[in-house]
Amino acid sequence: MELVQVLAGVALCSGLSPSQLASLAAISHREVYKTDAVIFNQNDAGEKMYLITRGQVEIRLNDGSGGNYTTIYLGQGQIFGEMALLDQGARSATVVAIEEETELYAISADAFVNLCQADTAIGYIIMRNMALDLSFKLRHQNLDPSASL
């Protein structure tokens, strides 16, 4: 499947035109990982967002006592690391490829900022979608009386 078609199905890209999706695809770089390869570790500097086009990744959190636990599995068409596009802060989890030949497309924060400066509509739409996603997560977390921020 062509990368533009995959991007069209990603919630973060909702509302982008075909030409804007093509611009986003043009700054994406293919990376392939073997089973058990660490894509990044918790607390690493965030510098890229990733889109999964083949395979699966596991998101792991440190448990505070030297171990870790799995929080979620992500597969084709899903993204992770998108907060790096905003603040390039420390990674909040470790991400590991769990299938052979897991294929990702990475977008660096610098390339994303340059694209948004060239086409502010792309930046507006993606930032709006990030804000909507964050708002959804915060509202649902606040509905759970046992959840804490």
Image: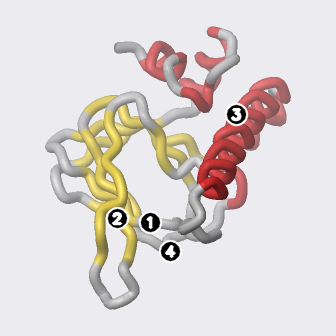
Residue 95, percent from left and from top:
36, 58
Which residue is farthest top? 18
Q: Which of marks 4 and 2 is nearer the N terminus?
A: 4
Disc 4 to disc 1, C-alpha distance: 7 Å
Q: Position of residue 6 (x, y in %)?
A: 44, 20
Q: Bin the neighbour count of mark 2 within 10 Å (Cα to Cα): few under 14, some 14-19, many 20 and up.
A: many
The single residue placed furthest to the front in the displayed view is: 145
Callout 2 amino acid: Arg
Q: What residue type is labelled 4?
A: Asn
Residue at image mark 4: 43
Residue type highlighted by circle 1: Ala
Is residue 80 among the parts visible in the rendering? yes
Label 3: state its secondary structure.
helix
Q: Are marks 4 and 1 in contact (CB under 8 Å)?
A: no
Is 147 situated left or right of 86 in this image? Answer: left
Q: For marks 3 and 1, give the CA distance.
A: 22 Å
Indicate the secondary structure of the residue bearing disc 2.
strand
Indicate the secondary structure of the residue bearing disc 4. Answer: loop
Return the x and y of residue 11 as percentages of the image width and height: 57, 28
